[in-house]
Image (cartoon, rainbow, N blue to C red):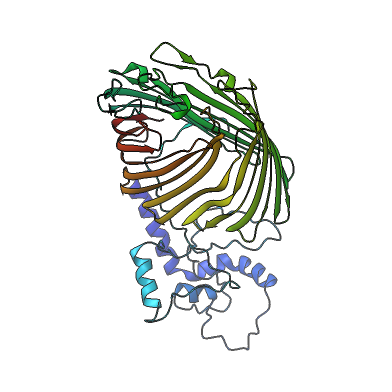
Amino acid sequence: MSKRSAKSRAVIALLALAIAPGALAQDLGPALDRSAARSPQIDPSAPPPDSVETPDELRSGLSPVTPAQGVANYGAPRPKTRLPKPYPPPRRRVGTPPRRLNPLPSLEPYKTSAVARRARREEQKPGEPPSEIPPTVAATPSIKAKPKPRPDPDPYAPIGIGVGSLRLDPFVETSSGYDDNPDRLPSVPYGTNNPVGSPFLRVDAGLRLKSDWERDDLFADLRLGYVDYFDYTQANRFDGAGTTSSRIDVTRDTSIDILGRYTLDSQRPGSPAISSGLPNVVVTNRPIVFSSGVSLGATQRLGRLEVSLRGSFDRTIYGDAYYSDGSSLILSGTDFNDYGITGRAAYEVSPSVKPFAEATYDSRVHDSYLDPYGYARDSDGYAAKGGLQVKITDLVHGEAAGGYAERAYKDPRLPELRGPTVDASLIYTPTPLTTVSLRATTTLNETTVENAAGTLSRTYSAQLSHDLLRNLSISAIGSYFTNNYEGASIFEHGYTAGVKLEYKLTRAITIHASVSHERLNSSLANSNYTDNVYMAGLRFQP
């Protein structure tokens, strides 16, 4: 069938419906009767309503429909409904409230940003301090400002080597220079042994050790050096010094202390202890003096009172001296052991002030009862001192003490060696760039000078250090010393002054240079001397 025939038939059907509505009503009569039977009855006497507006009509905006009596009203077409997106919507569990989207918080500027600083300035009134949130009010959460990097207080300090919980700081230092009196000889007019200057090379090696333990503590500082004089080889010598300390905390108030120490030095040929007494006979070598010792003790804290008791043992060894005429002075018989015991009590008045009192007894026993001159030099010593430990912030800290010491010898021909003592070690820091160190020591030393019981030596030293730059520092060093040979009427005094400059290239490499002048005046004839040393070198420290 063609499209044109289908259209013709549709037009004919519509015309028939328009011409004969009665036929349509006749055909639909049975259906309308069945619908009326199911629907509620309408009173024929009631006037027909003018119009009926259905909800769908109101929503759609269409004109109301006036139904004819006896004709079914199917209503206006419903509008299309839009489905929610996404579809189907997510299911919600039974008993839970409907999900609501929380709005995002407003953006807050950083505390260090320009916007935040401007807002604080606007909120703060002129003449009022910055507003602070009371401690009882909960502060609103804010974005944390990025922490600023902490500056390194000493960017050129060596880092060291970590071995477990220990920090090792080894170093090697090489120096070269000129010494115009290597053996510290006196200048004698027309003498045959006047001082001879010589260039030299010096090498030092050492180690610093520090523990990083929670309770106990371990510390060590060791050094050993050797100097080689190119034009005066008989003055070549070793020297060194070192200390170690260990603390074992048994309980909170009880600890065990272990101390170790050693020194290595040599006697100058012009020293009265090894002098030949002849004008043309001099010492041709530098006899060594080596001393080492250990101390063991315990410390008990009773509130603010601190009491300690320590026992000690020291061993001192002397080398033999050789003279220009072929003879020698055997000093091995003067080697001795020193046994001592020390008691100390301190009371903490405040965290920055702690007075203390200390008493020591020791006994020296020589390997040979008589020395080369026939004197019995075994002796007993007593010493007592009192002082103060101070720590006034970081400006002044250290220890200062004064007391009295004496030694009594077995040989009645030797007088007692006694006198007041002064011991101090103070560090004063007036500015972060300047440091002043003050030290004072008093010692009672052995000697082999005939008729002399011993040497009462006092040394006072000061050092001023200033940092010109972070890696450039200059230091001025000065000291004054006295040696009193009790019983021999020999008195010596002298001083040392010098300047030292250090420039740190990196953490591991340091350039240093120094100039020093030393002078000694003695009541013994032909014993005065002067010495000047010029030195420069490098220090390597990882």
Residue under the point 56% across and 20% down = 372
The residue closer to the viewer here, 402 or 245, is 402
Residue under the point 45% across and 26% down = 267
Q: Is residue 506 visible?
A: yes
Q: Is residue 418 left or right of residue 196?
A: right
The residue closer to the viewer here, 518 or 355, is 518
Residue under the point 40% across and 77% down = 123
Please, is residue 468 above or below residue 316 in the view?
Answer: below
What is the number of callouts on the image?
A: 0
Please, is residue 62 above or below residue 224 in the view?
Answer: below
Q: Position of residue 468 (x, y in %)?
A: 29, 48
Q: Quadrant of the N terminus?
A: top left
Q: Position of residue 444 (x, y in %)?
A: 56, 38
Question: Which image quadrant is residue 139 in?
Answer: bottom right
Q: Quadrant of the C terminus?
A: top left
Q: Is residue 196 left or right of residue 34?
A: left
Q: Position of residue 419 (x, y in %)?
A: 57, 46
Please, is residue 290 above or below residue 153 in the view?
Answer: above
The residue closer to the viewer here, 76 or 105, is 105
Residue under the point 64% across and 53% down = 356
Q: Is residue 222 visible?
A: no
Q: Residue furthest top?
A: 326
The residue closer to the viewer here, 470 or 372, is 372
